[in-house]
Image (cartoon, helix red, strand yellow):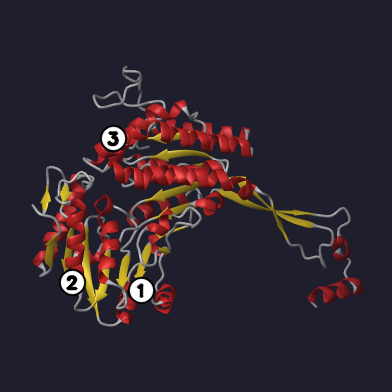
Amino acid sequence: MVSETFYCAACVPETADAPRRHGMPIETHPLTAPELQAALQVQRQAHRAHPMPTLHERLADLERLDRFIRDNTDDICRAISSDYGHRSTHETMMLEIVPVLDGIAHTRKALKGWMRVQKRDVDVRAFLGASNRVIPQPLGVVGVIVPWNFPVNLAFVPVTAILAAGNRAMVKMSENSRQLTRLILERLPSYFAADKLLFVEETGGIGPVFSQLRFDHLLFTGSGATGRQVMAAAAANLCPVTLELGGQSPAVVCVDYPLQTAAERISFVKYLNAGQICTTVDHVWVPEGREDAFAQSIQMVVQKRYGELHADDYSSIIDPRSFDRLTAALEEARAGGARLMPLLPGPAWDAVTRKINPHVVIGAPPDCALLTREIFGPILPVRGYHDIEDVIRHINDGPVPLAFYPFSHDEAQVQMLIERVMSGGVSVNDALFHVGQHDLPFGGVGESGMGHYHGREGFETFSKMRPVFYQARWAGTRLLYPPYGKRVEKLLAFLMR
């Protein structure tokens, strides 16, 4: 057994930077992997004692979740910025706080309808008088593994669906979200008991232990490589998984679409959170010969928006390893003959603040890291195409992307691209915003993931949509009982008509 150190919602490590309650150090003790198993067992026993929470109880849980976010918004924003080195408070509000609160409000409004027992048709000829129903029932205990890039959004959006479906949840945070996690660990117990909602701090190596727990469902958001490991660990328990991975999500600017408008929209999404978004534009295809014009349009837009590299509105790269990976990828592309175009005045990057100047890269070699791996940073390769068929073929020859972004005012062209290029989701004439629609499912396909959540699909993912057949007092099927003979032959002939 791997010996790990981690903390439950009531236990926070006593360090110099640990949060304090009422100005006093928080009493802590490190938990072991068996204690994590015990925490799961506590939640499971609580579920078995009360397996079907009422609508009123679920709405109360969602109200508490809403209150936790609202009560702690300012401190949440500060904690996330501290974890990043710097992240704009406005971006945290826009990309994390508001989507979570909107998602809770949408769920509270729709939950009664989602919980309603569904009537289904019955084969009247064979089952006269019987009835069918589909009953949404809670699965039990759901595990959630959260990445660092949007730690509030990617923790509390699924938790919203999990609680709405009547479950309990254990949530493992990223080691890059230490300050936020400790804030949650300190304050969440005032809103939720540990047998309902429990957060776990990642202190190194706890991920494999967590993914091996016998959850009733496991949601993982992160890289494809780690997703494979999580799925393999869950398979030992036959635990169903929802995997939200990533991939090289392309934008395609068609010949009819204005370059300036495309530049404004793509650059906003690409440099949001310094490009550290799984559904951002990874690279963009533009008509051949218009690469420089597109890059210049983006440069004008970005300089107007940010002004300079250390602008408060522009975020840092999360950690030194990611910073080094991105700068090495830029240097590799340069060595291969690419033209690197920093978009803001000043240095190409700053190792002290871990800020990388937003870049456009033209002519990147096909085998470089910028074109063969998900970038996950503020670097936009611009690629020219002569024939749209070449773009379709290139995208389809690679891993299925998490998102696809066609830009065209030609509805037939857009429809053709949607039909021929598979992806997890699509935004047309913009990027990213399909993810923020609460009534649309979110999820990948193939290498970009499996399963969906958000909105109704989240409720159904974390529910057992349980089919129930109710036999009538007088069962017509008794006419099919043996001994078989002419009577049964006539009935079978009747049923086959």
* SS under mark 2: helix
For this rendering, which residue is in front, 303 or 309?
303
Q: CA distance from mark 2 to mark 3?
A: 39 Å
| Residue depth check, mark 2 versus mark 3: number of the one nearer the observer | 2
Q: Which residue type does callout 2 highlight?
A: Ala
Is any atom of residue 51 visible in this view? Answer: no
Q: CA distance from mark 3 to mark 1?
A: 40 Å
Left-right relation of 348 to 391: left
Q: Earlier in the sequence, mark 3 or mark 1?
A: 3
Residue 223 % position (x, y):
33, 54
| Position above or below: 38 against 233 | above
| Residue depth check, mark 3 versus mark 1: number of the one nearer the observer | 1
Q: Circle 3 is placed at which residue position? A: 78
Q: Earlier in the sequence, mark 2 or mark 3?
A: 3
Query: Looking at the rendered structure, which numbered label has been put on residue 293?
Result: 2
For this rendering, which residue is in front, 434 or 240?
434
Q: Which residue type does callout 1 highlight?
A: Ser
* SS under mark 3: helix
Q: Which residue type does callout 3 highlight?
A: Arg
Q: Circle 1 is placed at which residue position? A: 408
* SS under mark 1: loop
Q: Residue at x 76, y 62 (%)?
A: 122
| Position above or below: 206 against 277 | above
Residue 338 % position (x, y):
12, 68
Is any atom of residue 380 visible in this view? Answer: yes
Left-right relation of 254 to 157: left
Residue 147 % position (x, y):
34, 46
Q: Are marks 2 and 3 in contact (CB under 8 Å)?
A: no
Q: Earlier in the sequence, mark 2 or mark 1?
A: 2
